[in-house]
């Protein structure tokens, strides 16, 4: 990859190139595989009987599993035919040594598989390019366009010929400050496999990994968003907030969501989007003369579209969910519940607080701990946009 360095930022030539000798395929965990792991002691026949009793459509479950595996096989065959060596790994086999071995990471699944794969790729040098294995059931927003799911060879040829543009998706770095910090990630999908894994055991695991370090960077970067708040969703989250080194504000809410541009089409959009019903009611209160459904829809769509911003934007968008604005809260008054910032600091006053990265990785965040959220160029995720001819 040819590059020149200017002001700490890499700038790439007009015709990009990519080393494609070794490709690591990261396999989606299908629902069928998940159920197999949940019941490892059962034979296939007993597993089928158990799932049917739980009202699963077992035949559909197995069909989608096979569809994914067939897609995975096609990707591997195309890569091998192009002279590219491959390895295929699942979640548990997705280790740093396998990542270091590869020139490119190719998640085969949907956005969940892509997020999991991207979370363990540090720095902005190794490209991550996703292929959607089942567009009929998964949006695959982070993957290559849907047409390449049925034309894998075309996608690989474009990569080999340099018919693409680099994209650097901004990611959020989290630094924790305090005493007895714990930066051991708790992978939420693994807890779903072990229902007997109690809250007490989670706390014990965390305490064993705690140290006396007063500042430490969390070992996972957020591609979509960071959620900060109480682990129990019905409990009010209490913390202090500071934006861009400004004054601190004490807030009570349902938690804080901090999003990248990539994540602005995901949870960020779901939290902040308004409905045509709300727009119509506001227009009625304002006495707006034109309240026909078409105009209401236009205003609604315009507002919601403006919530989305570039995946390469260096700003973070924050949303204080269900901000309590009554009595003394927030303290002091004047906090906007939604906005942009380059640096966000959160001081926990939670009982059982947590930081969740991209909906899949949990870190303990209890009273006395402060988290600093920032975006750095060197943390961006390298991916591609294929050039359409």
Image (cartoon, rainbow, N blue to C red):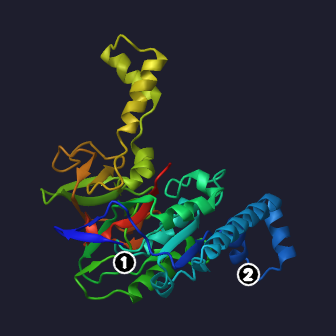
- Residue shown at 35%/38% (left/top)? 306
Decide: few, some or many residues near mark 2? Use Cα within 10 Å; few <14, some 14-19, many ≥20. few
- Residue shown at 41%/54% (left/top)? 263
Decide: few, some or many residues near mark 1? Use Cα within 10 Å; few <14, some 14-19, many ≥20. some
User: In the shown orientation, is residue 246 left or right of residue 172?
Assistant: left
Q: Name the residue under label 1.
A: 219
Q: Nearer the viewer, mark 2 or mark 1?
A: 1
Q: Mark 2 points at which residue?
A: 40
Front-lying residue, 387 or 58? 387
Q: Would you say residue 268 is visible in this rendering?
A: yes
Tell me the CA gap for discs 2 and 1.
Answer: 30 Å
Q: Would you say residue 367 is visible in this rendering?
A: no
Work out which residue is located at the far top of the displayed protein and give it: 289
User: In the shown orientation, is residue 173 left or right of residue 63?
Assistant: left
Local SS, label 2: loop
- Residue shown at 83%/80% (left/top)? 43
Instruction: Report the quarter where the N terminus lies.
Output: bottom left
Residue 146, given in percent of the width and then of the height, sits at: 59, 52
Mark number displayed over residue 188: none
Vertical placement of residue 240 versus 38, above or below: above
User: In the shown orientation, is residue 64 left or right of residue 154?
Assistant: right
Residue 25, given in percent of the width and then of the height, sits at: 58, 74
Vertical placement of residue 275 versus 157, above or below: above
- Residue shown at 54%/76% (left/top)? 23
Residue 49, given in percent of the width and then of the height, sits at: 85, 68
Vertical placement of residue 194 versus 141, above or below: below
Q: Where is residue 184, by image quadrant?
A: bottom left
Tell how many labels. Answer: 2
Local SS, label 1: loop
User: In the shown orientation, is residue 292 left or right of residue 27?
Assistant: left
Which is nearer the N-term, disc 2 or disc 1?
Answer: 2
């Amino acid at each position: 990859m040819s590059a020149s360095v200017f002001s700490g930022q890499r700038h790439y030539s007009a015709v990009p190139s990519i080393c494609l000798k070794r490709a690591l395929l990261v396999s989606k965990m299908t629902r069928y595989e998940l159920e197999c792991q949940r019941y490892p002691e059962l034979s296939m026949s007993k597993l089928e009987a158990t799932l049917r009793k739980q009202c699963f459509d077992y035949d559909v479950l197995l069909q989608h599993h096979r569809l994914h595996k067939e897609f995975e096989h096609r990707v591997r065959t195309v890569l091998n035919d192009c002279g590219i060596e491959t390895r295929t790994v699942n979640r548990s086999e997705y280790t740093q040594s396998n990542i270091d071995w590869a020139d490119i990471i190719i998640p085969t699944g949907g956005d969940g598989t892509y997020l999991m794969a991207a979370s363990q790729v540090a720095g902005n040098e190794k490209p991550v390019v996703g292929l959607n294995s089942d567009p009929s059931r998964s949006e695959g927003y982070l993957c290559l366009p849907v047409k390449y799911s049925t034309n894998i060879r075309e996608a690989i040829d474009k990569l080999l010929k340099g018919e693409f543009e680099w994209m650097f998706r901004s990611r959020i770095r989290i630094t924790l400050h305090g005493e007895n910090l714990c930066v051991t990630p708790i992978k939420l999908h693994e807890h779903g496999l072990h229902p007997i894994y109690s809250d007490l055991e989670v706390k014990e695991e965390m305490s064993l990994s705690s140290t006396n370090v007063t500042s430490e960077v969390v070992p996972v970067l957020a591609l979509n968003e960071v959620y900060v708040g109480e682990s129990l969703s019905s409990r009010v989250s209490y913390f202090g907030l500071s934006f861009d080194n400004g004054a601190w504000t004490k807030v009570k809410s349902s938690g804080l969501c901090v999003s990248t541009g990539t994540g602005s089409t995901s949870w960020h959009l779901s939290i902040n989007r308004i409905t045509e019903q709300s727009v119509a009611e506001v227009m009625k209160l304002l006495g707006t003369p034109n309240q026909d459904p078409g105009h209401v829809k236009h205003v609604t769509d315009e507002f919601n579209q403006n919530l989305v911003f570039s995946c390469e934007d260096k700003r973070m968008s924050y949303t204080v969910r269900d901000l309590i604005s009554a009595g003394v809260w927030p303290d002091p008054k004047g906090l906007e519940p939604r906005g942009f910032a380059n640096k966000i600091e959160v001081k926990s006053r939670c009982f059982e607080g947590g930081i969740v990265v991209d909906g899949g990785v949990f870190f303990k965040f209890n009273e006395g701990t402060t988290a600093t959220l920032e975006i750095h160029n060197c943390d961006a995720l390298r991916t591609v946009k294929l050039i359409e001819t």
